[in-house]
Amino acid sequence: MPVAIACSKLMDFLLLCYAFLLGTATAAYNTHGGAAASTTTTTTHLQFYMDDFYTGQNPTALRVVSGRSLSPENGTAATSPRQFGDIVVLNDPLTEGPDRGSARVGKAQGFAVRSSEGGIVSDLHMHLFLETGEYNGSSLAVNGRIDMDMEVRESVIVGGTGRFRYARGYMLSRNYEYDLTDGGVVELNVYVQH
């Protein structure tokens, strides 16, 4: 048998072995909870109302850094309700309805950094943690640019935990009843694939 034909048959055999090993490794990974274990995707729409209050007896959002107060030229500008460089921490209840007495379904925890010198624009990083129903104990991670001058703001779902592992999607937020000084209620519509 000529050497070229023998080498060709050997290469075919090695490629076949490699393909078999790769297929076996992939199947083993999938059966033991690997990333591709589930091939079905569900799209879920969730609607919440977020109580985002800066004032009152029990504020749910708190400005922990005032950007302008750190700037020597603007030492007295810290009294403005929102300004470039502010960092706000959130621990907002999520409720079924917009009323303060509405049933609680979870909490929104995270922070926002005021990232624009013009307008009220924030870089938002937040987890929506659910405490009731079929998604109890699961959470969604949200990132986004929040421009308060826009009626509807869109953020991205970048992942999740529990029933929302490997989640992706988007969140639409709009002011239900909101004021820049005191805060208020924000309507959240979440569309998530998981």
Image (tube, rainbow, N blue to C red):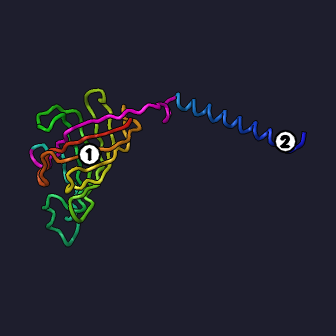
- Tell me which corner region of the image, top left, top right, bottom left or bottom right, holds residue 115: bottom left
Assign a secondary structure to mark 1.
Answer: strand
Identity of the residue drawn at 28% across and 49% down? 154
Q: Within 10 Å of the Cα at label 1, are there few (<14), some (14-19), or many (20+) other Cα atoms?
A: some
Identity of the residue drawn at 14% across and 38% down? 98
Identity of the residue drawn at 85% across and 45% down? 4
Label 2, label 1: how far apart the Cα atoms are = 63 Å
Residue 25 circle label: none
**37 part of magenta stretch:** yes
Q: Looking at the picture, how far across and down is residue 129, in whole percent? A: 28, 37
Q: Looking at the picture, how far across and down is residue 147, in whole percent? A: 24, 56
**134 part of magenta stretch:** no
Residue 172 circle label: 1
At label 1, the amino acid type is: Leu
Q: Nearer the viewer, residue 116 or 72?
A: 116
Q: Furthest residue to the left?
A: 56
Q: Circle 2 is placed at which residue position? A: 5
Q: Furthest residue to the right?
A: 1
Residues rendered magenta in the picture: 32-56
Circles 2 and 1 in contact, beta carbons < 8 Å: no
**Left/right of residue 23 with respect to residue 140 in the rendered view:** right
